[in-house]
Image: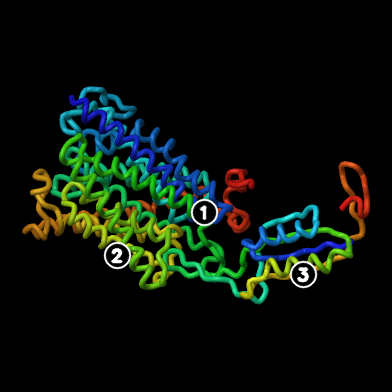
Amino acid sequence: MKKIEAIIKPFKLTEVKEGLSRLGVQGMTVNEVKGFGRQRGHKEVYRGAEYQVDFVSKVRIEVVMEAGLVQEAVKVIQEAARTGQIGDGKIFVIPVDEVIRIRTGETGKAAI
Amino acid sequence: MSTGDTAFLLMSAALVMFMTPGLALFYGGMVRKKNVLGTIMQSFIVIALISIEWILWGYSMAFGPDKFGIIGGLEWFGLRGVGLEPHPVYAPTVPHQVFMIYQCMFAVITPALITGAFAERMKFGPFLLFSLLWATFVYNPLAHWIWGDGGWLGRMGTLDFAGGVAVHLSSGVAALVAAVMLGKRRGYGTEEMRPHNLPMTLLGAGILWFGWFGFNAGSALSAGRLAGVAFVATHIAGSAGALTWIAIEWKLHGKATTLGAASGAVAGLAMVTPAAGFVGPLSAALIGVMAGAVCYLGILAKNKFHYDDSLDVVGIHGVGGVFGLLAAGLFASKLVNPNGADGLFFGNPSQLAIQGLAIFVTIVYTFVITYILFKVVDKFFGLRVSENDELVGLDLNQHEETGYEF
């Protein structure tokens, strides 16, 4: 089993979610984050004072799936989240030791 | 006694009262999240504190029986002698207590204005004490000088319709003293200190604009022509101020900002305050334009002179107060208000000299007394929070609360 962690532009969330749903992915966790990579921040101005704001708002999606689905899922995410502009984000694939469903106690694939 | 005037003044009092929580939101949105409650609390609590001060000795000192033109006596302590029959001089068509409670709201908002200068770094207890002392020894005398029956600035012919001297200039000067004596916030100039909730600031600005109709039009103390004059002037100056400020921003930075629109409106509203009952709509528009320009420069002065007036009280209220009082000396017309005077542009240059003297005296008096009061409070209690408290934020260490728990 693997976890995919994708940092994407916030307005791409719906597209990515729908793409993964079509693939059969059953659930995901999402949160709002801030970050930067090579994308520069931006400038804000308040009463004549300029601020360079380094951190940019992004969304992080975490999905756990069977290893066999990962390659397709990565492709789906990349296609859905890509704009071609700097700051599109990154995808990380991380191994998962165990998955447990809290309600029933199921483990492994059955718990995904 | 007039039911119309009384109703109008009561409603105006409520409008002016509303400006103080409006100010709380205006300021609150501009500070960092960790200080939002501390900032709001300073304005909010001052409503309660100064209202009690007002009915005990504040009203008496400001409007009570005149002593040598400089202060009212304490004959009206606890509102003794302040009944429901109209006072012959103060709003003669309205119960005396109604006039008193209207004036109360002015006394309340003035110390709240100063809080913007020392935002994010003052201890709560000493803040309460300072505000009480300042209201007593600065606001009350100034109010007496300009509005008291027998007050020397009023007797001299100073034109100040609704609060250039006692409210805007005084708080602006006090803010300068405060900014210098409290010192800069930790990290000023290097740390990011952006407004954390501009929607709240804009809401506050809207409330201030709304309440300002009570502040200026209500100062006519009657529901008639003069209130109409002041209402129109107030609204037009605010509008012109907002447009001018964003025009400047657009030119200098390429974008108009919401904070700029709010600031410009407030600048216009503040600057027209001394002149509101003496000028026509076009003069008010010019005053608003002046305000947008001059107060914008006033903000830039902060960087030039290296003081941390966190929320620009000096730039907007101080500068607005000075130029507003001068504007009254320029644009006042007896065609608009026969009980006022003519200004420079209507053939009477001497009014400008009177305004200038009033400005000078207010600045000097406020500066000296405010300085002394800060020194005294600092000596006994300390003014500024500890370094760690400032870093953690006032909400937690001054009030043990968190503003947002999303």
The answer to whether marks 3 and 2 sit on the same chain is no
Q: Is residue B193 above or below residue B197?
A: below
Query: Can you give x and y, in whole percent of width and height, for residue B367 in the image?
Result: 33, 56
CA gap between label 3 and label 2 equals: 57 Å
Amino acid type shown at disc 3: Lys
N-terminal of the pair, mark 1 or mark 2, is 1
Can you tell which of label 3 and label 2 is closer to the viewer?
Answer: 3
Q: CA distance from mark 3 to mark 1?
A: 39 Å
- Of tags 3 and 1, the one toward the viewer is 3
Q: Secondary structure at mark 3?
A: helix
Q: Both on one chain, marks 3 and 1?
A: no
Residue B207 in which image quadrant:
top left
Question: Which label was assigned to residue A75?
Answer: 3
* Circle 1 residue: B197
Residue A79: tell me if it is visible.
yes
Q: Is residue B176 above or below residue B151?
A: below
Q: Are marks 1 and 2 on the same chain?
A: yes
Whether residue B364 is visible, yes or no, is no
Q: Residue furthest front?
A: A22
Along the viewing direction, whichever of B95 and A71 lies nearer the viewer? A71
* SS category of the residue bearing label 1: loop
Which residue position is annotated with label 2?
A: B294
In the picture shown, does residue B74 fall above or below B140? above
| Percent coordinates x, y for residue B326 in the rendering | 20, 58
Task: Provide residue A78's location: percent of width, then percent of height.
Answer: 72, 69
